[in-house]
Amino acid sequence: MAAASAASVALSLLQRRGGLAAAAVATLSGSSSPSSLARRCCSAARGYSSEAAKGGEEEELQVRYLDDEHKGIVVLGLNRAHSRNALNKNVIKTLSKVLEALKSDKKVRTVIFRSEVPGVFCAGADLKERAKMHSSEVSSFVSRARTTINDIANLPVPTIAAIDGLALGGGLELALACDIRVAVTSAKMGLVETKLAIIPGAGGTQRLPRTIGVSLAKELIFSARVVDGNEAKSIGLISHVVEQNEGGDAAYRRALALAREFLPQGPVAMRVAKLAINQGMEVDMLTGLAIEEACYAQLVICREIFSMKEMCLSSKNVEKHWLTELGAITSPGGDIIALDTFKGDTVI
């Protein structure tokens, strides 16, 4: 009975995720045909748009698509030197647009958040701008910032925060939304909002305790304490700590090395693994295992579909929309030229 209940909850959670999860739901429920499973399983790995942030974004947020051995890595760099990378309305608006494009770009394998300003990651919200806002504007801004930082957490690919300096308030909340955090020993990190008689408003009260534990998170928030890189590593706030280099980008260099480790892995598997982990952490173990089973099942189905490649390559009578969902490239005459949706993906 408990297992059935867990499976039911898992199906409900995955149904709300859509796309990749839809195939897992269908697999467990046994209610879909192989062709419909194929369409839904593959749909989230397609539909990419590479329009994101190329040439038209504000200089306050630099977006770089790396090449060569780093191809697939996108670097988002905060660049507001005059305000220590404080988050203002323009940065939040621009970041929101960039994230919307990144989440559906099939060329993106990992996203790194860094600072283009030496000695600082992000000092939090732009208090000078906020001081000029009406109370209703403040509420709207905080809501927009919270939504945007949630969008970072919900990106389907791995995300890394490279903290080469100060990360306070909203800056640390942005880093907490990333999957992995790397910092230099000299970095300063903290949720210091209680000093201003407010509380963290962009996820800090929820993500910090999930990262370092409830009691310690309360202690840090209640005291507005700031920790350095070594202490942050000891309490589990960051995954890696490094000594700063002469160029002031040691954390970024370490983040880049981590991102390179992710590149050879199966792209679909990476997305589904992140989905399974994120969803599983919000439920009990039994439900989490049901989520893992659903996610694993959909990858097996996707792999089985890919094994049909040779059959598809020799056929001209397969439904056109089905081929499109699989990633087939056809000639004007209808011949199937290539089928590479799952290229490089591996299921153990």
Image (cartoon, rainbow, N blue to C red):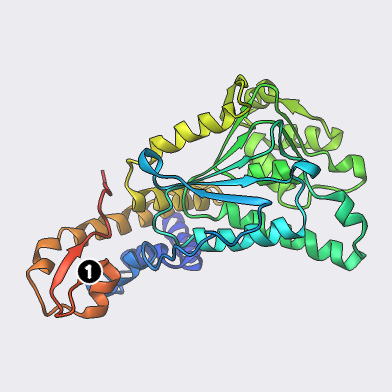
Choose between 63 and 163: the one closer to the eye: 63
Which residue shows up at 40% across the image and 44% down it?
67
Choose between 104 and 196: the one closer to the eye: 104
The answer to whether residue 86 of the structure is visible from this angle is: yes
Kindly indicate the quadrant of the structure image that contains residue 215: top right
Choose between 348 and 54: the one closer to the eye: 54
Q: Where 263 sits versus 242, above or below? A: below
Q: Where 263 sits versus 146, above or below? A: above
Residue 314: percent from the left, percent from the top? 7, 69
Kindly indicate the quadrant of the structure image that contains residue 236: top right
| Three-letter code for the amino acid on which mark 1 is drawn | Ile
User: Please, which residue is most extreme toward the front here?
Assistant: 55
Q: In the picture, which quadrant includes the N terminus?
A: bottom left
Residue 208: percent from the left, percent from the top? 69, 40
| Residue annotated with mark 1 | 329
Query: Badge 1, how many Cα within 10 Å: few under 14, some, many 20+?
Result: some
Along the horizontal axis of the image, is 15 left or right of 118? left
Q: In the picture, which quadrant includes the C terminus?
A: top left
Kindly indicate the quadrant of the structure image that contains residue 318: bottom left
Which residue shows up at 33% across the image and 52% down it?
296
Which residue shows up at 32% across the image and 47% down it?
266
Q: Where 196 sits versus 30, above or below? A: above
Which residue shows up at 18% across the image and 79% down it?
332
Residue 166: percent from the left, percent from the top? 74, 33
Residue 84: percent from the left, percent from the top? 77, 40
Along the horizontal axis of the image, is 5 left or right of 130? left
Along the horizontal axis of the image, is 79 left or right of 276? right
